[in-house]
Image: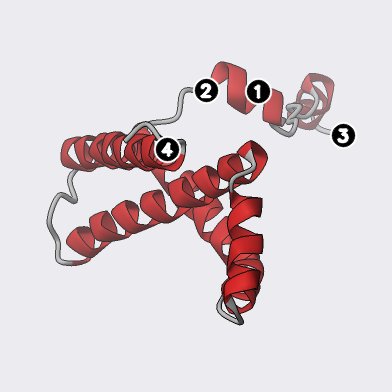
Amino acid sequence: MSEAVREASKKGRPEFRNVGIGDITSKYRMPPSAIVSILHRVSGAGLFLFLPFLLYLLQQSLVSEISFEHFRGIVDNPFAKIILLGLSWAYLHHFVAGVRHLFMDNHIALDKDAAQKTARWVLVISLALTVLVGLKLFGVF
């Protein structure tokens, strides 16, 4: 064996390990555009999964006045209101992030600084609209 091969085998191979979820959440700081992207996917998946349930409830509430009053009573439950608030956030966030993507498809705000700024606006607008829906849902106004 040549001297170079012996030295290479003594050094060993570098050790690579997988990055766990704890490393991602504690060590790395994601930019706002990454957070918006992940939340856009989560909200879309949530809307997709709850859509059959919501359509069923809509169908059953339109059958008669009695069924409408029955489902109205269900929605008065605070737990149901929290679920509706979560679905409202999912819809509003998905909508606002979708508008942001439409602007980006038209080559508006594609550079890094503008993308981070629009991502922050998506978070602010969707949360503000969700707060308004929550206030209306819980009867503040």
Q: Would you say the residues marked 4 and 3 are in contact, meaning their CB atoms lie under 8 Å apart?
A: no
How crowded pointer 3 is (Cα within 10 Å; few <14, some 14-19, many 20+) is rated as few
Q: Nearer the viewer, residue 125 or 5?
A: 125
Q: Nearer the viewer, mark 4 or mark 1?
A: 4
Please give the residue where the numbered disc 2 appears in the rendered image: 28
Sequence-wise, which precedes: disc 1 or disc 3? 3
User: Is 4 positioned to the left or the right of 114 in the image?
Assistant: right
- The amino acid type of the residue labelled 1 equals Asp
Q: CA distance from mark 4 to mark 2?
A: 32 Å
Residue type, label 4: Gly
User: Residue drawn at (83%, 26%), measured in percent from left and top?
Assistant: 6
The mark that comes first in sequence, 2 or 1, is: 1
Residue 140: x and y in percent read 37, 31
Residue 81 as seen in the image, left or right of residue 108: right
Q: What percent of the width, then of the height, locates residue 125?
A: 26, 40
Q: Quadrant of the N terminus?
A: top right
Residue appearing at x 23%, y 64% in the figure: 102
SS of the residue at dot 1?
helix
Q: Is residue 13 above or below residue 75?
A: above
Between tags 4 and 3, which lies in front?
A: 4
